[in-house]
């Protein structure tokens, strides 16, 4: 009864009624979107790192294929080529690949017993370039020509372009997916705001007619949905971090699969998830609410 | 809590000039309304159901915009008012809605606090005022109750308390006694009279002719969306009073001093 009510201890009630059933479903949907967005970001970072690693490996070396001329033996031609290349600026080391290793490279195509003794297996020279000032393919070619060696320099540029291209595609795909999920989350929030305003039109109308500004009413929806989305972002981002950590633990230092080398620091990308989700929700809810309120006189 | 208003009683609070209202493409609900309400006046608005009483009130409390004509509130042409200024005009108007429009998820106390919260006031500045007001309207024992647990009369008094708590300059009440018995209707009318005595302009829409005639207050009638001749004839002349409605081409309305509401007249809870 009234004896229990002390106006001095009164705390204002929430102006918008709680709708727990709807709120739970909304949190779940946005959490799933946040999980997918964070997972995309983590995997994109890993893929980018893998591509970068491969590109660095290829960028730091070159392969020279030796063709013999006249009576010179392949081994001698390869030795002369390695010697000429070793003295070229920008080359750290040039080594002749032994016949056995060259044959091993052909095994996938010819099989172990398919290489006959007389097969003219091309001799290869592997060149390790100076990482600070790598020699260009043209400089290597000029050095070989000056030494009178007939050879082809493969600086892996063809492969590297493919890898760089693949890395770019992975980045673009990740950014696109991330944007798509942010837009999906914003659409879900906008839909929920519209539904909330519609379901609580009576409350909104009373506040409107009692002197609430458009901004005040929009703030109520903005705050509510931002808080819900921030919670969803925390749950979704946390789940993505747990999954990524599990992959990292299961796969050791290189992750579950070598093409996705996840690092512990990658998990930090999930940290801004609540903030970003809350921000997207706040903007979506505010824009939607203001649009609907402005339809009132 | 409530202090006498120090207001110039020649001030025009509401002015309608050739106002019409149309919903969508339908025929005009209100036509050619021209009148003024002076500060501190008390009027009834009568007419049969569907005559346009609620629509007229809605125009005043800015729930609708007129299709044509000009409306001035507190001296401001609302047709030229910026949208951001309208909430501040609405805060000067207290409305008792026909359906009461209580916030069912909030307690009695929270419902009454709504206008203060929307005006950005801190709870410490109005908590005790609300408690006093709720005592005054007979809801002191039900401050924490939810509206759904209240009787019809209690809900009506709650709606009235919410409408008056922020000391609006004008109170508009749409059928405030519609669901009440005659005795409770009279008691609520007495409450409005007291508020009017304290300086608040009052306009009550009612189709209860017994209530209107027994009050002795001036009334104007609306039929088929048009203001017609006044319903109430002179009860007692008071030449010093020009608080009444001045409708162009209409006879001047009469005004009788409202009853005073003492502490003994406080509205009490309905019987067991």
Image (cartoon, coloured by chain):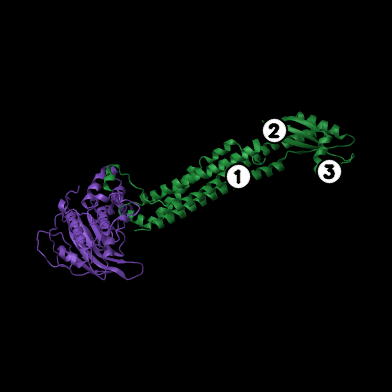
B116 on left or right of A243: left
Q: Chain of mark 1?
A: A
Q: Which chain is purple?
A: B
Residue situated in front as seen by the camera: B254 or A79:
B254
Same chain for labels 1 and 3? Say yes or no.
yes
Residue where numbered disc 3 is placed: A111
Residue A171: give its label.
1
Residue B85's x, y, as percent? Answer: 30, 52
Q: Nearer the viewer, mark 3 or mark 2?
A: 3
Find numbered disc 3 in the image and state the secondary structure of the residue it sits on: loop
Q: Which chain is green?
A: A
B154 on left or right of A272: left
Residue B11's x, y, as percent? Answer: 18, 55
Residue where numbered disc 2 is placed: A134
Q: Chain of mark 2?
A: A
| Badge 1 or badge 2: first in the primary sequence | 2
Crowd class of label 1 (few under 14; some 14 to 19; many from 20; radius 10 Å)? some
Crowd class of label 3 (few under 14; some 14 to 19; many from 20; radius 10 Å)? few
- Residue that appears at 73% across and 38% down: A155
């Amino acid at each position: 009864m009234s004896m229990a009510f002390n106006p001095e201890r009164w705390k204002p009630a929430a102006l918008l009624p709680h709708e727990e059933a709807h709120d739970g479903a909304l949190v779940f949907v946005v959490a799933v979107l946040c999980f997918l967005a964070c997972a995309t970001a983590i995997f994109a970072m890993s893929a980018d790192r893998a591509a970068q690693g491969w590109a660095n490996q290829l960028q730091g070396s070159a392969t020279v294929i030796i063709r013999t001329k006249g009576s010179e033996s392949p081994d001698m031609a390869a030795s002369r080529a390695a010697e000429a290349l070793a003295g070229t600026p920008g080359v750290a080391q040039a080594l002749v690949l032994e016949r056995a290793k060259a044959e091993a490279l052909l095994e996938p195509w010819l099989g172990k017993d398919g290489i006959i003794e007389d097969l003219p297996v091309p001799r290869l020279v592997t060149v390790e370039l100076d990482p600070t000032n790598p020699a260009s393919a043209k400089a290597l070619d000029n050095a070989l020509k000056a030494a009178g060696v007939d050879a082809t320099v493969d600086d892996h540029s063809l492969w590297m372009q493919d890898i760089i291209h693949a890395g770019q595609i992975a980045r673009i795909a990740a950014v696109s997916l991330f944007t798509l999920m942010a837009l999906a989350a914003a659409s879900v929030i906008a839909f929920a705001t519209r539904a909330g305003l519609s379901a609580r039109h009576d409350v909104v109308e009373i506040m409107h007619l009692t002197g609430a500004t458009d901004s005040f009413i929009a703030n109520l929806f903005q705050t509510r949905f931002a808080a819900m989305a921030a919670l969803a972002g925390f749950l979704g981002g946390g789940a993505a971090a747990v999954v990524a950590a599990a992959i990292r633990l299961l796969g050791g230092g290189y992750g579950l699969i070598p093409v996705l080398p996840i690092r512990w620091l990658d998990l930090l990308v999930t940290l801004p998830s609540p903030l970003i989700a809350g921000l997207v929700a706040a903007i979506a809810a505010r824009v939607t609410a203001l649009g609907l309120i402005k339809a009132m006189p | 809590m409530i202090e006498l208003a120090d207001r110039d009683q020649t001030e025009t609070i509401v002015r309608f000039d050739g106002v019409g209202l149309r919903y969508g493409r339908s025929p005009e609900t209100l036509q050619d309304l021209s009148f003024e309400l002076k500060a501190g006046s008390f009027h009834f608005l009568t007419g049969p159901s569907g005559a346009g009483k609620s629509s007229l009130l809605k125009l005043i409390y800015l729930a609708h915009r007129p299709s044509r004509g000009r409306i001035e509130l507190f001296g401001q042409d609302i047709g030229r008012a910026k949208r951001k200024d309208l909430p501040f005009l609405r805060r000067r108007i207290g409305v008792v809605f026909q359906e009461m429009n209580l916030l069912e998820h909030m307690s009695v106390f929270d419902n009454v606090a709504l206008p203060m919260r929307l005006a950005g006031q801190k709870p410490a500045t109005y908590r005790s005022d609300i408690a006093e007001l709720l005592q005054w309207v007979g809801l002191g024992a039900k401050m924490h109750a939810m509206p759904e647990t209240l009787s019809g009369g209690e809900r009506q008094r709650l709606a009235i308390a919410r409408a008056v708590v922020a000391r609006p300059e004008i109170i508009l009440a749409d059928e405030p006694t519609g669901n009440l018995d005659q005795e409770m209707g009279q008691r609520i009318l007495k409450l409005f009279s007291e508020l009017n005595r304290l300086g608040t302009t009052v306009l009550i829409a009612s189709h209860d002719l017994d209530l209107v005639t027994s009050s002795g207050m001036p009334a104007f009638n609306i039929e088929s969306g048009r203001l017609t001749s006044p319903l109430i004839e002179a009860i007692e002349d008071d030449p010093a009073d020009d608080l009444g409605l001045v409708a162009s081409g209409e006879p001047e309305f009469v005004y009788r001093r409202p009853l005073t509401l003492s502490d003994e007249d406080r509205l009490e809870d309905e019987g067991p």
